Image (cartoon, helix red, strand yellow):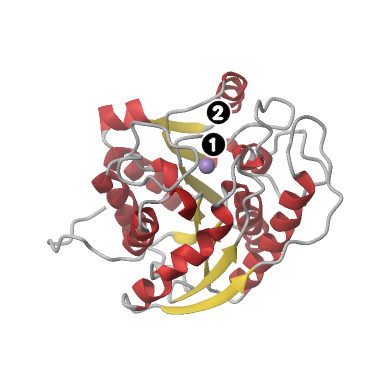
């Protein structure tokens, strides 16, 4: 198995962004993740961790057509995130983007796509989320841009001028945990051939079988792997600190299994922790869970047991 050379130093990039969400609070996410011990947890696993602080959004005059809210601010963050992320990739380190709402995915996946192109490699994206975030400014009902990054990075029209990056082939976009999709969004997902793994599939097949198949494709393509973990992937009973709760999410163990399998694949090259809204959290419960899940993605084992092949 090819190991990425950059997995020993992890760079934290804070993104205090909430303009992509429908309600305020996610701007406090990076701080909460730091207080919950993101750096210490990874250091305890043997990684060197450097904290690059919070990105400062660039000034832009980006205005798309359609309903998009706060587009200039979202584009300003996206460009700043992408530059910060690319710099980390170029230094052969692994970036973790501390959100911030999910619109930070414009920047984090943008960075991964630019770097993959520069290196002549493929990229796969695993989007752990209740929503596929595949709306466009033309079809979005709310206009909240945290519901749009995947449409942009898969090359949908309607985002011209936001930021330059190569498009991700939709078959390499794996949306896992889905249980809330808008009608026009559903149509686009089907037309484009996105790999949508919804909760009924997870119930029926088990999340382990689904991840094994996806990680097999990443291995086959010798690809970089970006993982984007939204708090609402997890059931709101376990992770209440998010503005977009949808019942019927992943259990504690399902979420950890996903992250453990991602670690065992040896393929992870970048990670987002997004949509944590500390204002809505229950005494830091969701912040701590996100840090624990990140640690599972870097090799922490909850139950000590003999190693099995992935
Ligand atoms: Mn999301």
Inter-mark Cα distance, 1 to 2: 6 Å
Helix, strand, or loop for circle 1? helix
Residue at 50% x, 34% y: name it.
131
Q: Is residue 227 visible?
A: no
Q: Residues within 10 Å of mark 1 (few under 14, many from 20)?
A: some
**Place of residue 50 in the rendered image (x, y in percent of width and height, measured from the top left):** 51, 79
Q: Is residue 208 left or right of residue 94?
A: left
Residue at 36% x, 43% y: name it.
234
154 or 251, nearer to the observer: 251
Q: For the view shown, which residue lies furthest in the right direction?
A: 61
Helix, strand, or loop for circle 2? loop
**Place of residue 174 in the rendered image (x, y in percent of width and height, measured from the top left):** 48, 40
**Residue that label 2 marks:** 193
In the figure, 11 relative to 145: above or below? below
14 or 156, nearer to the observer: 14
* Labels in figure, total: 2
Q: Are marks 1 and 2 in contact (CB under 8 Å)?
A: yes
Q: Is residue 216 left or right of residue 127?
A: left
For the N terminus, the quadrant is bottom left
**Place of residue 158 in the rendered image (x, y in percent of width and height, measured from the top left):** 77, 34
Residue at 35% x, 36% y: name it.
249
**Residue that label 1 marks:** 171
55 or 125, nearer to the observer: 55
**Place of residue 283 in the rendered image (x, y in percent of width and height, measured from the top left):** 35, 57
Q: In the picture, residue 13 is in which quadrant?
A: bottom right
Residue at 55% x, 28% y: name it.
193
In the figure, 216 relative to 132: above or below? below
């Amino acid at each position: 198995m090819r190991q990425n050379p950059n997995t020993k130093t992890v760079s934290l990039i804070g993104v205090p962004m909430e303009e992509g969400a429908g309600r305020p609070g996610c701007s406090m996410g990076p701080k909460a993740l730091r207080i919950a011990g993101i750096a210490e947890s990874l250091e305890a696993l043997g990684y060197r961790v450097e904290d690059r602080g919070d990105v400062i959004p660039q000034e832009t005059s980006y205005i798309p057509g359609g309903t998009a809210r706060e587009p200039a601010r979202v584009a300003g963050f996206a460009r700043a995130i992408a530059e910060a992320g690319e710099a980390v990739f170029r230094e052969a380190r692994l970036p973790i983007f501390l959100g911030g709402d999910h619109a930070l995915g414009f920047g984090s996946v943008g960075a991964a796509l630019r770097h993959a192109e520069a290196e002549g490699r493929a990229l796969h994206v695993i989007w752990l989320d209740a929503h596929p975030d595949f709306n466009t400014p033309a079809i979005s009902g709310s206009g909240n841009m945290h519901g749009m990054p995947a449409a942009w990075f898969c090359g949908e029209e309607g985002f011209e001028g936001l930021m330059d990056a190569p498009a991700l082939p939709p078959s390499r976009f794996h949306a896992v945990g889905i249980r809330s999709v808008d009608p026009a969004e559903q149509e686009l997902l089907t037309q484009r051939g996105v790999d949508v793994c919804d909760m009924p599939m997870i119930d029926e097949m088990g999340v382990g079988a689904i991840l094994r198949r996806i990680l097999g494709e990443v291995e086959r393509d010798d690809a970089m792997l970006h993982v984007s973990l939204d708090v609402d992937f997890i059931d709101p009973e376990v992770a209440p600190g998010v503005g977009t709760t949808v019942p019927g999410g992943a259990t504690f163990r399902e979420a950890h299994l996903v992250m453990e399998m991602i670690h065992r694949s040896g393929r992870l090259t970048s990670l987002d922790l997004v949509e944590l809204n500390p204002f809505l959290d229950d005494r830091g419960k969701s912040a701590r869970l996100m840090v624990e899940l990140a640690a599972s993605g870097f090799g922490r084992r909850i139950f000590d047991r003999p190693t099995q092949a992935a």
